[in-house]
Image: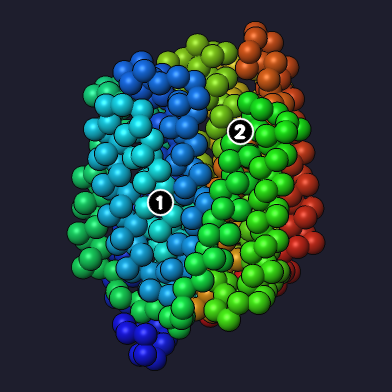
Amino acid sequence: MSANEPVQSPVATPHPRRWQALGLLGAAQFMLIVDITVVAISLPHMGADLGLDREQLTWVMSAYTLAFGGLMLSGGRAADVFGPRRLVMAGLTVFTLASLVSGLAEDPTTLLVGRVAQGVGAAMLSPAALSSVVRLFEGEERNRALGIWSALGGTGAAVGVLAGGVLTAGPGWEWVFFVNVPVGVVILVVLARVLPPLPAAAQRTRPDVLGAVLVTAATGSAIYALIGAGDEGWGSARTLGFLGVAVVLYLLFGVWQRITSAPLMDLGLLVRRPVASGTFVILVATALMVGIFFLGSFFLQHREGHSALVTGLLFLPVALATMAGATTAGRMIGAAGGRRIAVVGNAVATAGFVVPTLWDGTVAMVVGLSVAAAGIGTLFVVASATALGQVAPEESGLASGIVSTFHEFGASIGAPVFSSVAAASLTGAATGGFTDAFVVAAAVAVGSALVAVVLIPPRPVETGI
């Protein structure tokens, strides 16, 4: 579409292949989320083969998350300006090629370059894919679609633990990356036939390069600070310094958006009640999910003595519970409304967190994680449906980018917060640290329910644009 062509609105009649497109987009998003956790179990093997020190091992994990989260808003805006289909295809191509580079790496530099490139591709793909889902579906169908989307994304972290154990124990750590290549190519080829054009919804204007640089640097600084907080401490000069830099850059971004003639985004979008409440829910849900996965994985391997493969298999019911919670919420949210679903989801999650504090052992941990995951799965649907249910087509990509950015903030917060609380049990034989961490998780879920009552609009979610 040329710059002078009029902006087109989405077609009124539903696209006949919308469900096939949803399945493919969900599979692509699933692959992105899996890559956050699939690497964790294989890190010791990567370190041994490539001679990685502790700091380099940390960056194998962090480089992906940093690029993914830092560029998300720019990727979302690009989806609005150039059309989500173009960004989906480009992002998937970059991610697939970067996975090949990472798997072929024979030195630390190549591996880290590949991981950064994976994050860049993911930042292009994720918000554009979610924007496509929002624009392909209407009304109650959109709720169901977002339920499926959230279920796939929510289970990705759990499946990543399983896949990492299976692949590392089998063909080797390289295959945690290589497996993305055939999957990515197949999705790319089929999407080219199934995904409709979904033309750009926003007028193409002079790109706001300074705005993109400021918001990317701000988000990157914030995520970098959160990633390192577990090792450096929340009150360390490094953590506070990068958080301070992020605040300053966000303020500069806000000022620039008000004075430039072609802003990257309408800042009013951030303070709309649906968007604000949706981003709060996704932040809390992701932090809880990543935090308890970290605790559960550590407990099962180091406290109970299970292998990486067995630990991955024990996470299967957790993945299934997440999917069940999300799909159920997708079917109910249109009638019940986001507020009620959020309260119920937080209550279920709280009940799950309590189980490991009352009983010890593998069974209690798996049962508690599964119940909690079912509750958290509902929250992912609430977040997406609430934040995106009332945005205009020209804002869907950017709004998706905002939701996805706060997802990465939550992922960056979860592990360091809960590892700090459980520190005594992570480094010794005591179990009190695990109990303390799950008590904190339960308290966060209760607080989240109370905030949801105040923040989330009371009426059922309106999903028409």
State left or right for residue 8 relative to residue 140: left
What amino acid type should be assigned to the residue bearing mark 1?
Val
SS at mark 2?
A: helix
Q: Residues within 10 Å of mark 2 (few under 14, many from 20)?
A: many
| Residue found at x 24% / y 44% | 181
Q: Is residue 431 above or below residue 186?
A: above
Residue farthest toward the top in the current orientation of the protein: 429
What amino acid type should be assigned to the residue bearing mark 2?
Gly
State left or right for residue 138 relative to residue 93: right
Q: Position of residue 178 (x, y in %)?
A: 25, 37
| Residue found at x 33% / y 69% | 85
The residue where tag 2 is placed is 228
Cα–Cα span, label 2 and label 1 = 21 Å
Q: Is residue 196 visible?
A: yes
The residue where tag 1 is placed is 120
Q: Is residue 371 above or below residue 128?
A: above
Q: Position of residue 273 (x, y in %)?
A: 71, 69
| Residue found at x 51% / y 44% | 66
Q: Is residue 60 above or below residue 399?
A: above
Q: Nearer the viewer, residue 66 or 139?
A: 66
Q: Quadrant of the N terminus?
A: bottom left
| Residue found at x 68% / y 23% | 422
Q: Position of residue 311 (x, y in %)?
A: 45, 23
Q: Nearer the viewer, residue 402 or 372?
A: 402
Q: Is residue 199 above or below residue 338?
A: below
Q: Quadrant of residue 368?
A: top right
SS at mark 1?
A: helix
Q: Nearer the viewer, residue 458 or 408?
A: 408
